[in-house]
Amino acid sequence: MCLRKCRVNRRSVFVIGVILIVIATGSGILLLVSPPANTRTRPEFNIGGLLVNDFTYVLQYDSFGGREAAVTALITTPYDLLIIDLFFDSSSMWTAGEIATMKRGADEGSRKILLCYMSIGEAEDYRPYWNDEWDADEDGVPDEGAPSWLDIEDPDWPGNYKVRYWDPGWQAIIYGNASSYLDQIISRGFDGVYLDIVDAYEYYEDRGVDDADQRMVDFVAGLSSYAKSARPGFLIVPQNGENLARRIPDYLNHVDGIGREDIYTVDNEVQDSVEVNATLSDFALFLDVGKFVLDIEYPDDISLLADCYHHAAEWGFLCYVGPRALDRIQVNPGFEPD
């Protein structure tokens, strides 16, 4: 299965001034062996009743050597929090039993928090809800008879389509009935959901939908209320779209934390300092009210990798550096999960 994240081609591993050895194991775990970094004390958050100070993010399982091996790897990894997909492959969801085993961990005291990835701002043509007749000619434009919520294909992500996320038809696919995506996540026992493409409001603002940000907040608030009624304590964690908290402060009442990719780097380049500072200002609003922040970075330059962890610790964020394809559990020396 090729999920949204694997559509970015990862650059070749390189490093300047240090030696980097990559060991790709058959169990879907990537070990980076390098001189140990000077690790600073990392933040710790109470998430779902557990103290969490590290996490991993893996959506592809082809490299794990089969379903049983993937389950074993997810059980035994010492990371406190896992962000995974609802599906092992394109046709098979994880079972409730598998999720329970992953959450329990390898032994007493190794309980994990499991968040399930779900895109709410784009439709994905490899999901069960997709109907090939919606774009039968595959020209990226919905065909006659396609649902009113379906918009054009994202030019940067083939197979992913913009959606009018405020449309009741799309929202019914996401939550509110036994067959909806969120209900499947809840029924399998996940601790929470990790919402992607929350920043879709920016696309529609650029196209004249003046209240697109409020429509996204209303969408997240509705699914949050629904999920927490169905499962008290269920976690709602959006990815990106952090400036919603500044635009519409009520947004913070409906989420438990936030994740963000590329806060400090874009692959092996450091982000512009003006953009970084603006992002940090938005995240301060989350931290000030006790929400956690997850920072996902993708450099394979060892010095930048260390900088990501150091800066995240200074800022009060949890950090994970891994492959952009999100197809392995990466362990970084000096910053190992404990």
Image (spheres, rainbow, N blue to C red):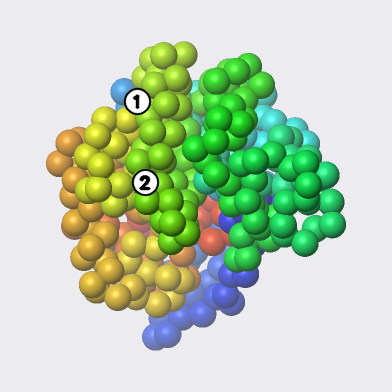
The quarter of the rendered structure image containing the C terminus is top left
266 displayed left or right of 162 = left
109 or 270: nearer the viewer? 270
Q: Secondary structure at mark 2?
A: loop
Q: Position of residue 45 (x, y in %)?
A: 26, 36
- Disc 2 from disc 1: Cα separation: 33 Å
Vertical position of residue 282 compared to residue 102: above or below: below
- Residue holding disc 1: 48
Report whether 258 appears left or right of 110.
left
Question: Residue at position x 36%, y 38% from top?
Answer: 217
The amino acid type of the residue labelled 2 equals Asp
Q: Residues within 10 Å of mark 2 (few under 14, many from 20)?
A: few
Residue type highlighted by circle 1: Gly
- Where residue 268 sits in the image (x, y, percent)? 43, 76
| Residue that label 2 marks | 211
Comparing labels 2 and 1, the label whose residue is closer to the camera? 2
Q: Quadrant of residue 208?
A: bottom left
Q: Seen in the image, is 123 located left or right of residue 39?
A: right
